[in-house]
Amino acid sequence: MVQIKLDESTHNQTEGLRRLAQLPIQIKDKSVLTLGFNENWWMQDQEGRRLQIDFDENRKDYWRTHRGSGEPLARALGYKEGVRKVVDLTAGLAIDAVLLARIGFQVMAVERNPLVYFLLSEALLKAQRQDLQGLQFHFGNALNYLEQIDISQPTSVYFDPMYPEKKKTALSRKEMVMFREIVGSDLDSEAVLNQSLKRSFHKIVVKRPFRAESISFSPDYALKTKLLRFDVYYPRGFS
């Protein structure tokens, strides 16, 4: 179970604790979920590593400069074709979801890990910036969400599965090491892609390392940057 710690200067913890109690969160023993003086939650593990999500203060990840509709990801999703709704099936730390919201998309970001979802949701409630009004988070499994979503206007899917970690590669940021340990690997990537292709989305875009193999089968086309590749698929059959 989660060990909760409240900073002495914290005043408004009641609602956050109520939301936390509604989620099926279990963490390794001695891990601590803390509500600090700035009303922001973070998690700290036994090794002292901290995972914290702050959309206002973390300027490196959440205030990145961008080219608007000229961003490769925005182009892949169909911004210039009139698409304004995106379902992000792997919210993670929401770095790409925030970027898409800032560009002008309405983004529903799906996160299946209850702790990460809680940190994301609380960070969004706390955020003061106006460019995140189009961002929402949904707690649940991507496959289940794909079955229930009502696609009433042009909508694209964004899918960024967790890449398998190379044995000789050490992640540079401690919070990313901790994040990997919390969420694990995406073992259902092929099933998620195949389910996405059955729905009437405008496009399905999968983020991959530049030289990585495609998931399941080759895309209809790909947009490439120096380090990444966005594999673009069109639906194969509606349901």
Image: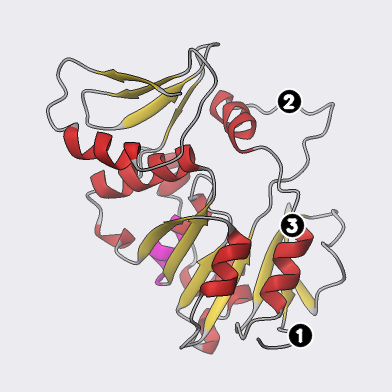
Q: Which mark is residue 189?
A: 3
Q: Which mark is residue 236?
A: 1
Q: Nearer the viewer, residue 148 or 107?
A: 148
Q: Nearer the viewer, residue 229 or 188?
A: 188
Q: Residue furthest left?
A: 11
The local crowd at label 2, few if under 14, some if 14 to 19, many if 20 or more residues have their Cα within 10 Å, is: few
Select label 3 or label 2 by which is in front: 3
Q: Position of residue 139 (x, y in %)?
A: 46, 53
Q: Earlier in the sequence, mark 1 or mark 2?
A: 2
Element type at mark 2: loop
Query: At 34% from the left edge and 67% from the top edge, which residue is drawn?
Result: 134
Residue type at mark 2: give it.
Answer: Ala
The answer to whether 60 appears left or right of 37 in the picture is right
Element type at mark 1: loop
Instruction: Determine the image quadrant of residue 165.
Output: top right
Q: Quadrant of the C terminus?
A: bottom right
Residue type at mark 1: give it.
Answer: Arg
Q: Which mark is residue 170?
A: 2
Residue type at mark 3: give it.
Answer: Ser
The answer to whether 187 appears left or right of 176 in the picture is right
**What segment is highlighted magenta in the picture?**
98-104
